[in-house]
Amino acid sequence: MKFESKEDAAMFLLECDRPDLAATVDESFSPDDELVEVFIQRRKATVRHLKDFRRQQITRQQWRHNRYNMMKGIKSFHKSTKGKKFHRALGRFLSTRLPLAKGSLLAVRDIGEASYIRELGEVFKALSSYKTHAWIQFENYMSASDTADYEIFLDAAVEAITKIEVELMKPTPVLDADAVDLVLASLNHNYVLDPLAGDETSFQALQDSFQEVLETNAQEEYPYIATLQWLRQRGPT
């Protein structure tokens, strides 16, 4: 268990019913296995009830059009995986190998090219790294509410990555747009935009446009795919 501040460490100890230790804890605190086990056992039921409650409040229509606002755990994922290499590999693959057209299925382009075969190995390593780092986040202390939010995101993210992995093993892969859109939403957008830019000036223009267009597409079924489709059609400026 890792802590970003002594306040997080103190909250951890209070949840373990150890206020005697919480009063004097500092940044160097590292819990022993017994305390971690107590924490995990106490958290299980709380987080499960929070997840169930939140899911019960979300209708299918709300989830379709507002899932990224509701999936607050994406923010924790962004923060914990900042700078990781998988963002670049997946961003380039999704930006250049998929049509990013409307529809529930996206056929991978140019799969006969030798460059595609070479790239695919890097993509599989990136997908594996994505899942690994998504799980690593659980090594960091989070509040019960943040943990519930993160688990909702993690459930959806692992399912999406697994769908993509299974499909990419096929001779003519066709990816599920819902899975692709979720992965796009959880990547560092600079690495998604970079392959679409011709130079530094056009990259800055794409950055400036991205958030504005994304907000316009907020109610689209696949808002990130729709946004990148628009930016690709617009081309470098």
Image (cartoon, rainbow, N blue to C red):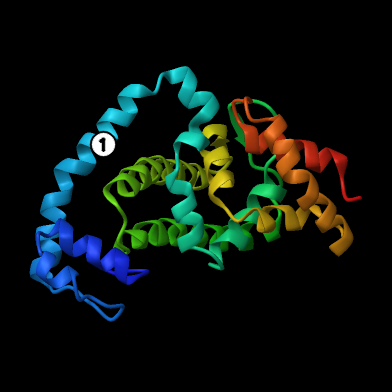
Residue 14 at least partly seen? yes
The answer to whether 15 appears left or right of 237 in the picture is left
- 99 or 34, which lies in front? 34
Q: Which residue is mark 1?
A: 50
Q: Quadrant of residue 59?
A: top left
In the orientation shown, which residue stands out farthest toward the bottom?
A: 28
Q: Residue furthest front?
A: 23
Q: Is residue 150 left or right of residue 88?
A: left
* Disc 1 residue crowd, few under 14, some 14–19, many 20+, Cα 10 Å: some
- Residue 214 sits above or below residue 2 on the image: above
The relative height of residue 187 versus residue 31 in the rendered view (above or below) is above
Q: Quadrant of the N terminus?
A: bottom left
Q: Residue at x 69, y 43 (%)?
A: 109
Left-right relation of 48 to 183? left
The image quarter containing residue 50 is top left
Foreground of the two, 232 or 6: 6
- How far from the left and from the top, in percent, is residue 148? 31, 43
Q: Amino acid at mark 1?
A: Leu
Where on the picture, by quarter, is residue 235?
A: top right
